[in-house]
Image: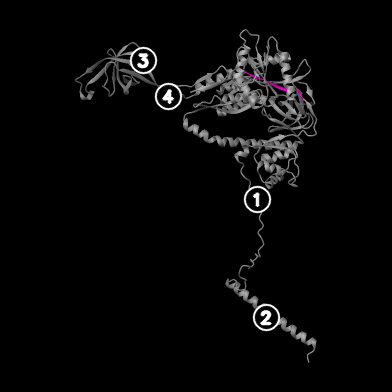
Amino acid sequence: MISLLEFWIEFGSLLILRYFHASSGLLARRKNEEQSGLKLRDKEKPKGKFSKRAKKSQPPVEAQYVRKLKKTSKSLQEKTVEIFDGMTIVELAKRTGEHVAALQDILINVGESVGSEFDPLSIDIVELIAMEVGASVKRIHTSEGAQILPRPPVVTVMGHVDHGKTSLLDALRQTSVAAKEAGGITQHLGAFVVSMPSGASITFLDTPGHAAFSAMRARGAAVTDIVVLVVAADDGVMPQTLEAVAHAKAANVPIVVAVNKCDKPAANAERVKIQLASEGLLLEEMGGDIQVVEVSAIKKTGLDNLEEALLLQAELMNLKSRVDGPAKAYVVEARLDKGRGPLATAIVKAGTLVCGQHVVVGSEWGRIRAIRDMMGTLTERATPAMPVEIEGLKGLPMAGDDIIVVQSEERARMLSAGRKKKFEKDRLLKISDGRAEALKELEEVPERAEMPIIVKADVQGTVQAVTDALRTLNSPQVFVNVVHVGVGPVSQSDLDLAQACKACIVGFNVKSPPSSISMAATQANIKILMHRVIYHLLEDIGKMIVEKAPGTSETQVAGEAEILGIFEIKGRSKAKGGEVRIAGCRVTDGCVTKSATMRLLRSGEVVFEGPCASLKQETQDVEKVGKGNECGLVLCNCNNFQVGDVIQCLEQVIRKPKFISSESGAVRIEC
């Protein structure tokens, strides 16, 4: 008998041998099939409905995720997204139409840590993200928990040129600004605070009335609470009056009408009221809500009634504003001072602007170094409805830009850079959109001269107004190309640029250039036009455009002659052309020239048109025969004329465009 131990040893060795035998055969078989390129047969795989899919043994390839940014659509460019402090990524994604992951990637790029998509963000970071995707933003500041107090009204005085807007303000504040203005008209927008005898204070904005300053009036209506529409009683409603009404309606601002110059003999206030009512203004006397006050700036009458009307309108509007918190302000004007640098005149709409804060103004930034009121007095802070002048900006902002307060200099730099980048993108987009139209114009008008101009003015708003006015002088024959604009006097760099592009330099309301620059401009044959009144500037530029225009070629009748008799010369040789018929004519209008083209008319219809072969007066060959004289005329290849026919002398003339200036101040070039 075999012991139990021996049995297990013998049985275990068999198992081991069988195991290795089976494994080595299988391995050899697999090796042979791999060498021959064959795959294992699938006969052992289960077939049918419940067969399992073979799992891939290879690990997935690790590749870096690249986010595909969508191209900014034009609709997003034109869309304005409202943003506020504490906004989340999810809320911003809904308003911009972008994916949350895409906005989180941008958040990392601007240097912020990414937490939850529901974490609140500061309003500056939200603006940076929105600008990165190409959206325009509008900041919304909450008044929750802030101190809300009544504020003085901001009143803008509008109206037609020379209707007495500035004189009315002079009477209110007992100053004489109109006498200081060039030509007696306001050239830029001014802001003043007038303390009334009742103790109330009103912030007034004076806007220009000339047609060239339409953009300034639009800015005035955008930052104002009430519009005072000044209409001269002896002149009535004029084009700029209607334009001011349109600006006020577009801004949804109430209007108070001041009928000025009521002291003049030709004044007719009732006619003005009827004209205003016919333009859609609902006056109080006719059942509407627009107050009408008759005043005289010269006699200083009716000013108390105007003050009462303004304060009553402000009381009805219940004007209140947030006093604490970051300021919300708008730039009214901007200029460059030689000693203090870029200066911006601004009106605070809400909050308090404090000296030393970091601000972003449009696409410029800076730290407020000083705040001055309209009297030039230094102050530490500016409250709502207070016009102030701030200094400390790194660059000159545009009139109409918003002023926002940021936390640090780094944040101000980032916002400024982001806004400049978006401004450049929008500018290039407009250029690309207008390229097709420009090409179409060039095809329609093959011959078009270019007139490059460099504009320098005293303040930023005036620069924009003058530039817009010059561009209205574009015509099919002359293209007014404003190659450069700037604030300040004419400098050597302006002269170098003008010499490079053969431009004309326009200086408006700035100091005359030094003698060295004037002499250099004369030697380089560069024109420098210095003006202080917009009328004279546009008139001079209009004359230059007319001179530079190539003109259009036209056929014009230089003279007419009537055929009184016909003479025939017979017996000529074939070499001389055979028989000749001579028309005996008398010149009835203008003069007849031999080198001109002749047109033969019979009963008003054209019979022949061609050159003249011969023109004689008595027996002498002549080149020209004047009105009232008789002559003999031979037409080339035409003998079919009769007594009573009319021969017209045609000439080609170059017709130049005309510079037209209307009474309202609007100018244009008529071709």
Task: Kindly identify which numbered label has been placed on residue 66.
Answer: 1
What separation in Å lies between label 2 and label 1 (alpha carbons)?
53 Å
The majority secondary structure of the magenta stretch comes to: strand
What residue type is disc 2 on? Answer: His
Residue hosting label 4: 553
Q: Nearer the viewer, residue 104 or 289?
A: 289
What residue type is disc 4 on? Answer: Ser
Q: Earlier in the sequence, mark 3 or mark 4?
A: 4
What colour scheme does the image use? one colour
Number of numbered callouts drawn: 4
What residue type is disc 3 on? Answer: Cys
For image coordinates 20% across by 23% down, the residue present is 573
**Badge nearest the viewer, 4 or 1:** 1
What separation in Å lies between label 3 and label 4 (alpha carbons)?
20 Å
Residue hosting label 2: 21
Secondary structure under the numbered disc 2 in the rendered image: helix
Secondary structure under the numbered disc 4 in the rendered image: strand
- Callout 1: few (<14), some (14-19), or many (20+) C-alpha neighbours within 10 Å? few
Q: Earlier in the sequence, mark 2 or mark 1?
A: 2
**Badge nearest the viewer, 2 or 4:** 2
Q: Earlier in the sequence, mark 1 or mark 3?
A: 1
Q: Which residues are magenta?
A: 151-160
